[in-house]
Amino acid sequence: MSQSGSAPRRRLGWRERWLAFRNGTVANPAFQRWAAGFPFTRRIARRNTRALFDLCAGFVYAQVLFACVRLDLFGLLRSGPLPPDAIARRLDLPPGRTLTLLKAAASLDLIARLPDGRFALADLGAALVGNPSIAAMVEHHAMLYADLADPVALLRAPAGATRLARYWPYAATDGAEQVSPDSVSAYSGLMATSQALIAGDVLDALPLADRTCLMDIGGGEGVFLAQAGRRHPALTLRLLDLPPVAERAETRLAAEGLGARATCFGRSFADTPWPHGADAITLVRVVHDHDDAVALMLLRAAHEALPPGGLVAIAEPFAGTPGAEPVGDAYFGFYLLAMGSGRPRTASELSAMLEAAGFVEIRERRTRRPLLARLLTAKRAI
């Protein structure tokens, strides 16, 4: 102990000393100016400058996209290029402000400016036209942006004191009886639209050919279950979700000609035990919506409901996905924080939870777009 009574300072390792030196050097304005002009560091310096500026301006980029979606600019250009004055008339905007929007959208590669001055869809804009679920999420983000207006306040606020928490009522309630049909209608359509974006990817990787009955937990309006049923005509279908949601799912599945094969259970999945009889259970974008204790309860309930050899599948964006770390850790981390429940988890964390719930043969199965959804499967021991 030193004379002041404080603990002796720990000796820094070489990695820490190097990191301290490197950070001090990079933070020096004189070094920054030198690096921007030196041939061997110029490209790195410029790339870092652009990355830092993009972080500062990212909200503006997102709002440009929001304006394009709200005004249906991509739908307007779907049939072919148009000159700025024609676009201004169709959007009911002043010509100068229309041009501001068009230039901004073109700079983000959403649309393209042709040599003759007309504007046309670019690849990203065309992709948005073909995926209405993305446009629905862009519109939905207005609530997330409102909750993130003061991110420090969000970090300090009690759970549930946000617009997103009110939008997703199951995140802030403990029982099915507290969720009304009116509150469900606000989010159920969004879930259905966005689930269609990933259902095909998950089903491409999910081994259901040897299964007889699939139960989808928290299955919303039944979009995923319907796609599974069409792919596997012999599969009996079950869905478990809150009563008002299960009613909507029953209507959808009947309208798609699957009513005779499907049973919808209207109850909270916190009410255990779950119905038995399914030899496959899916949790599609469900586990990350819940805190650790509830998530583990879900997996234990799945284990109890399955027969020996039964299959469980978790499909959702994972934290730490290579090449998409900001999606899992930044976007979903803060989205779920604003929602007031859950957190993104790595494949290793989810595997450990599956093992703790009693599952074996835990493995990840490759999906087409891991940024949107990765897939873990496991079995109940025989």
Image (cartoon, grey):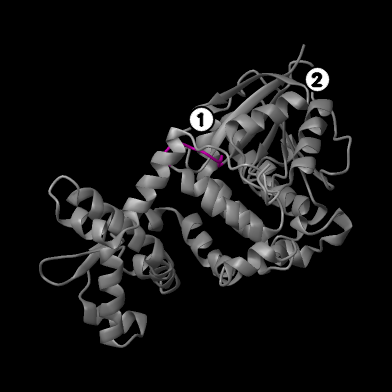
Give the class, few, some or many, for how many residues have Cα within 10 Å of label 2's Cα (few <14, many ≥20): some
- Looking at numbered disc 1 in the image, what kind of residue is underneath it? Asp
Earlier residue among tags 1 and 2:
1
Q: Residues within 10 Å of mark 1 (few under 14, many from 20)?
A: some
Q: Is residue 319 magenta?
A: yes
Rendered view: 220 above or below 356: below
Q: Residue 98 vs residue 369: left or right?
A: left
Circle 2 is placed at which residue position? 307
Q: CA distance from mark 1 to mark 2?
A: 24 Å
Give the image location of residue 191, x and y in percent. Answer: 62, 54
Location of residue 59 by image quarter: bottom left
Instruction: Please indicate whether residue 364 sits to the left or right of residue 79 in the image.
Output: right
Provide the secondary structure element on which disc 2 rests: loop
Q: Position of residue 100 (x, y in %)?
A: 28, 78
Residue kind at label 2, given as amino acid type: Pro
- In the rendered structure, the answer to whether residue 294 lies left or right of residue 52 reads right
Start-end of magenta stretch = 317-323
Give left or right: position of 286 versus 302.
left
Query: For residue 204, which numbered disc appears in the image?
Result: 1
- State the residue lying farthest toward the front: 3
* Secondary structure, magenta segment, majority class: loop
